[in-house]
Amino acid sequence: MELNWVRPDRGALFVVAGPSGVGKSTLVSAALAKLPNLRFSVSATTRAPRPGEVDGTHYRFVDDARFARWVDEGAFLEHATVYDHRYGTLRDPIERGIEAGSSLLLDIDVQGAAQVRERLPEAVHVFIAPPSRDVLRQRLEARGTDDVATIARRMELADEQLRGCADFDYLVVNDVLEQAHTAFEAILVAELSRTVRRQRTTQQLVGG
Ligand code: ADP
Ligand code: 5GP
């Protein structure tokens, strides 16, 4: 009898949200490198790629017309306008992935998280918070991907994201990075270990 400790019968859907610059990509990339059967859900967006971003890996970069067509066709599990651009999670790869036993990580904003909460109640919601607004600003500056005006706008919108944090199942404060990695991965592993997701394994164990 061979048991795979993190392979559920039905995959889990992890929604990760928090203000831009808080460290979502950092935490998500590390978890993806460490945990098997976990995949990143590649969103569609109308924003332009940043240097180093690859179409199909970081995002599917599409024009406004294609995004609008997918909205009309009901292709999105959720979609929202963030920082003047449209972002959305395509429904099909999510449903197929979960049914095949893969788990998916969605890095989306709080408006999108609210839509997923309504449409897929089984999803697990994790909010990543900064230790303070000042630290958040420093991280955005240190990342070096945005100009001064964009950083100011992201700081304005950070408050909107922070206001939604109480609706999430878990809160990770990303202060000392190592501790945040540990907390984030503990949440993922605990959720993947729940017996409701492991009914095939529990049946094997009792000899069924
Ligand atoms: P997000 O995906 O939420 O926009 P990133 O993962 O891109 O945020 O992180 C923003 C910046 O902050 C990056 O330069 C990243 O290396 C840095 N960073 C992330 N977590 C920490 C931390 N705990 N301490 C210091 N810097 C961090
Ligand atoms: P960025 O442009 O910095 O990659 O992302 C900006 C914001 O858009 C982040 O808060 C990110 O979580 C959010 N975002 C990325 N993809 C999606 C998506 O598919 N849906 C929603 N609702 N938000 C998204």
Image (cartoon, grey):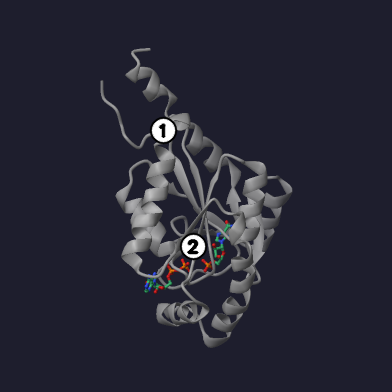
Residue depicted at x 60% and y 43%: 91
Q: Which mark is residue 128?
A: 2
Viewer-proximal residue among 25 and 199 = 199
The residue indicated by pointer 1 is 8
Looking at the figure, which quarter contains the C terminus? top left
In the image, taking residue 33 as reference, residue 130 lies left or right, namely: right
Q: Give the residue type that dot 2 points to.
A: Ile
On the image, the x and y values in percent for residue 55 come to: 47, 60
Whichever of labels 2 and 1 marks the residue nearer the N terminus, that label is 1
Viewer-proximal residue among 120 and 51 = 120
* Quarter of the figure with residue 138: bottom left
All told, the count of numbered labels is 2
Q: Which mark is residue 175?
A: none
In the image, taking residue 69 as reference, residue 7 lies left or right, namely: left
Viewer-proximal residue among 2 and 85 = 2
Residue depicted at x 65% and y 55%: 79
On the image, the x and y values in percent for residue 118 come to: 67, 45
Q: CA distance from mark 2 to mark 1?
A: 24 Å
At numbered mark 2, what does the secondary structure look like: helix, strand or loop?
Answer: strand
Residue depicted at x 63% and y 55%: 112
Q: Give the residue type that dot 1 points to.
A: Pro
Q: Residue furthest right?
A: 72
Density class for disc 2 (Cα within 10 Å; few <14, some 14-19, many ≥20) is many
Viewer-proximal residue among 72 and 113 = 113
Mark whose residue sits in front, 2 or 1? 2
Looking at the figure, which quarter contains the N terminus? top left
* Quarter of the figure with residue 157: bottom right
Q: Quadrant of ligand 2?
A: bottom right
Q: Is residue 151 visible?
A: yes
